[in-house]
Amino acid sequence: MIAVSMTVNGARVTRDIDDATLLSDFLREELRLTGTHVGCDTTQCGCCVVHLDGLSVKSCTVLAAQAEGGAVTTIEGLATAEGLHPMQRAFRECHGLQCGFCTTGQIMAGAELIASWQGPLDEHRVREEMEGNLCRCTGYHNIVKAILAARDEMDLPDA
Amino acid sequence: MPKLDILGALRSVGQPMRRKEDQRLITGQGQFTDDFTMPDQCWTAMVRSPYPHAAIRGIDDRGARALPGVIAVLTGSDALADGIGQIPHNPVPSTRFDVKLTGRGGTPIYIGEHFLLPVDRARYVGEAVAMVVAETREQALTAAEAVIVDWDPLPWVAGTREAAADTAPPVWDGLPDNILVDATFGDEAATDAAFAAAEHVVSATMAIGRVTGVPLEPRAALGWFDPETERYTLRAGSGGAVRQKHELATVLGVDPEQLRVISLDVGGNFGTRNRAYVEFGLVLWASRRVGRPVKFRADRSESFLTDYQGRDLVVTIALAINASGRFLAIRSDNLSNVGARCVSLSPLSKGSGLITGSYDIPVATLRSRATFSNTMPTQAYRSSGRPEVTFAIERLIDKAARELGFDRLELRRRNLVAPSQFPYRNAVGSPYDSGEYERNMDRLLEIADWTGAQERQRQARANGMLYGVGFANYVESSIGSPKERCDMIVAPDGTVEIVIGTQPAGQGHETSFAQVVADLLGIAFDDVTVTLGDTDVVTGGGGTHSGRSMRHASTVIALAAQDLVERAAALAAAHFEVTIDEVTFDTGVFGARDTNLSCDWAELARAAAHESAEGLRVRRDNEMHQPVFPNGSAMCEVEIDPETGGIEITRYTTVDDVGRCINPMIVHGQTHGGIAQGVGQALWEGCTIDPDSGQPLAGSLTDYGMPRSDNMPSFVTEIAEVISPTNPFGVKAGGEGGTTPAPAVIMSAIEDALAPLGAIEIEMPATPNRIWRAIQTLRDRQPQNAQMECAQ
């Protein structure tokens, strides 16, 4: 057992856990943040994407201990007091989700892509960058549309 | 008595209403099975067979029991001793319009046994033969590795044709030749005569391989037994909680009311979850044994091995054609691989009824067979049975056009069922309801810019690429379980809840059903809620499969709404002190003729609540057997790098007649996903089995090729609404039409791209490796290459 401390969605958490605990299990089982989903256990599907210190990680292949001292944002922490994140709104508006299982990972990966991408972002680039997030329902068409729509919205000057 | 005017009431129906489901799903508040944890719960892991076929000589669990955290190791013998029974599969589809499959000579179909844990032998790799219950999932998985099974490997067979061969080892002692279905349909004498007289006969044998659904939520189950009430509860995502309740109650040997099944958010289904899984029964039984809730979650490899799989049909098909290109007769021999036990014959049955495709072929003979094999059982998968037969007929028409010198579109046009022929009964008896098949084709060719494809091909070739255009028509049947139930309840604030027995896994029932209810009752979309998936609330219903849900739901909702209006009208009559015949109803407002009296749903619900505790509610059951036949056309363009076999889909366009479209945003989304699954089968997906060892080779997402964002194009999808005369809203079905023509249209495009090099048939999945090999074969066949080789 080891003690780990990190910030999750803005709140400081400390837990004694088994050394081998994955970050995804830590979030789901210890903190009951079940919006982070596990679809494959092997870093293939992207359902478990969260942000660790601002970067997308697949939390099923990060040890909770590796996040020691870090700042984790999960889907539950993406919206703010002002409302949903533009990526969340865009997924709803563009019908970028069906069953919703991969969606939380898609939204987290899409949000980080928009925040970190330097330069123009077109459909081709979004498709290349998002290939690590699988979806079985949408054929990706509306996911790509949603990410580009969120990008457009986030580029808008403040109202 | 007010009568509902359905078509006059439509306001939100037909609009792209944003989904009610989305708020919880985009904020991480979804309620998937694995999101639930119970105090004191323990975990289970399965001991699975490493052999495709092996007798179980003994199970030694001493080592496993000694490991930390282990609570119990349970085997099939323990289950038998506790009176745990088999899963009661009823594999033959149940409506009056489904093709009636039988064993040889009309005999009953032998389906094999399906105990939760077999005691005699394992019949496929991955079959569970024992379960370990432990404090944690990791402890259970570790202990499962320590259970020693004394295996005695037996001869096995996996391939479809091999399993049906005379020399194949039997999967079941009770059926020595493995052939559980052998039935012939149509008019054999007339077919033989038409073939004998035909100018041309074109034939082919095609394999539509085994794939798996890959819903991204791995299947999971949480079961518990309450000793005080003697009641079981199961949380498990499925295609219909009501069906699961009845089947699992049979397994447990209890009255169905002693079992509650809860299926809330379901992370994809595509058919894989429609039938009961052994683990669902096992967690319930084990919970009673150990006195604690027991949870199971498959990892991805277990899902690849033991989710019910799809397709796997071998078709030998021939078409008789006259000199002017009219189809005279079709003959087909369809062989389905059901795996180690017969769970569902839906794929074979659905395809059997559609063997003539979109075409007016006067006579047909169809032989439908099914074989056991030492593989995971198959089940309906995304447009069950229909992509297979669409592939067979559409690819055969392309071949006929090529070999006989017809234009491939013109040959199709000459034979399509014409609008004037509806209702049309095809040569094996399927009653096509409505459609404008040639108009679909025309519209598709227009929006996909068929005429411009030649120029795109010229440009691609100038860049050294191969470029092909694929085309396919399709018609499919939507039948499904015939019964559906709707409870409709008006709350005192005038909001309405419906309870219904379908089970969505992303299809947006909470939204599209609410649109129907809102319009019929004349209330706001926001004032309707839809309750699904908990058998303590949802008491009846047929689940979600075969494109049945929107059609069955809108029909039973329309009937319930009429009942509710009548019940409310009686209350209004008493309230207004008029006769019921004087009560009017318009857009949510009840009135009395020739007066200015009026009241709304809220007032009547409050009045009803005064009368009885039940308040204002109705329950309606409906049984509907009549099928509908969604149809359409699809076209795609592909670019192939001749040096690598790498393929890119550059355009993909469809026109789909879904009947009345309730929510176009949802229907387009369903179509997109359907296309991707069909394309996946054509290009990447396959549950390959090693021919030497019988081991499945696709055990993870690294071995099983999936549609990804960077290998799929954006789509152009258009909805055609030819209203079905068979149900009140005129609904057919949406979504599966994306899948149905996709394997055919992709393979058609690849064949067209390779045409400058020659004609060759490539098996699905057409991976870059297979395409590259085909290109080499074709190049070797070319005379200049032969000469070069001689010169060397």
Image (cartoon, rainbow, N blue to C red):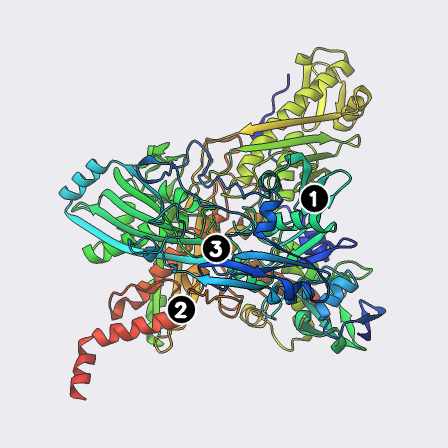
Q: Relative to B411, does residue A82 appear above or below in the rendering?
A: below
Q: Of residues B578 and B432, which is closer to you in this image?
A: B432
Left or right position of A118 against A127: right
Label 1 belongs to which residue?
Answer: B233
Q: Earlier in the sequence, mark 3 or mark 1?
A: 3
Q: Relative to B137, does residue B314 appear above or below in the rendering?
A: above
Circle 2 SS class: loop
> Of the residues shown, which amino acid type is indicated by label 3?
Arg
**Which residue is found at the position 35% from the left and 60% from the top?**
B747
Q: Mark 2 lies on which chain?
A: B
Residue B350 percent coordinates (x, y): 41, 43
> Of the residues shown, which amino acid type is indicated by label 1?
Thr
Left or right position of B586 against B675: right
Residue B156 percent coordinates (x, y): 39, 59
Label 2 belongs to which residue?
Answer: B767
Residue B730 percent coordinates (x, y): 50, 34
Q: Quadrant of the N terminus of chain B?
A: top right
Circle 3 SS class: strand
Q: Of residues B537 and B83, which is closer to you in this image?
A: B83
